[in-house]
């Protein structure tokens, strides 16, 4: 009777307290705990400028494990402060879905000759504007004559930032 009272107080069974059965507890039955998602590995292929474009290094420097739910092909480490109003800071990792074009206003990794930069892309009839998310950084404008200088690598779909 004492074991039964202890089991009731501890919200378990007398059999468990006596060691006759193993109690299994599903931690995911708690409402605010979610399981760790399945992951996939994507290459971190260098740095991308968030400011003045930097030389794009196309070698794989590392692999990152990201949720398999995120549709991305590679990652780039941000350098600079031109995207701070989009909450993308120096040192953050941006996940890129490789695609040759983006919609107006989307953030994209863009090659300008041999340099890569991260900017919002705005397309007009005869020009393309690459706009920073920092009012201190001037937009970059390209006319139809300059189109051969730029190439969209892909759309920024996610970013990873350190908690400070």
Image (cartoon, rainbow, N blue to C red):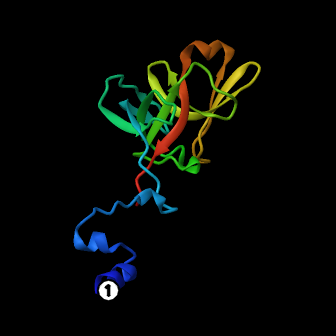
Residue in the image at 49% along x and 46% along y? 81
- Image location (x, y in percent) of residue 50: 49, 39
Q: Nearer the viewer, residue 153 or 29?
A: 29
Q: Which residue is disc 1 drawn over? A: 1
Looking at the image, residue 89 lies above or below residue 23: above
Residue in the image at 50% along x and 23% along y? 111
Q: Nearer the viewer, residue 33 or 48?
A: 33
14 on left or right of 116: left
Residue 160, by quadrant, is: top left
109 on left or right of 55: right
Determine the secondary structure under disc 1: loop
Instruction: Specify the farthest residue to the front.
Output: 1
17 on left or right of 163: left
Residue 163, by quadrant, is: bottom left
Instruction: Specify the farthest residue to the right.
Output: 125
Q: Nearer the viewer, residue 144 or 47?
A: 47
Q: Nearer the viewer, residue 113 or 2?
A: 2
- Image location (x, y in percent) of residue 8: 39, 80
Give the quadrant of the N terminus: bottom left
Give the quadrant of the C terminus: bottom left
Residue in the image at 53% along x and 43% along y? 82
Residue in the image at 50% along x and 36% along y? 70
- Image location (x, y in percent) of residue 72: 49, 30
- Image location (x, y in percent) of residue 151: 55, 19
For the residue carrying disc 1, how many other residues have a C-alpha within 10 Å: few (<14), some (14-19), or many (20+)?
Answer: few
């Amino acid at each position: 009777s004492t074991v039964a009272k202890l089991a009731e107080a501890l919200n378990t069974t007398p059999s468990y307290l006596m060691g006759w059965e193993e109690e299994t507890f599903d931690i995911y039955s708690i409402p605010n705990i979610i399981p760790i998602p399945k992951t996939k590995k994507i290459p971190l292929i260098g740095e991308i400028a968030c400011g003045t474009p930097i030389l794009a290094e196309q070698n794989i420097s590392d692999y990152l494990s990201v949720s398999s739910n995120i549709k991305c092909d590679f990652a780039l480490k941000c350098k600079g402060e031109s995207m701070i109003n989009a909450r993308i800071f120096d040192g953050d990792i941006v996940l890129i879905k490789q695609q040759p074009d983006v919609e107006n206003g989307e953030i994209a990794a863009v090659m300008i000759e041999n340099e890569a930069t991260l900017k919002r892309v705005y397309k007009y009839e005869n020009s393309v504007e690459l706009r920073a998310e920092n009012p201190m950084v001037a937009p970059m404008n390209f006319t139809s004559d300059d189109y051969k200088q730029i190439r969209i690598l892909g759309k920024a779909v996610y970013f990873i930032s350190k908690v400070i």
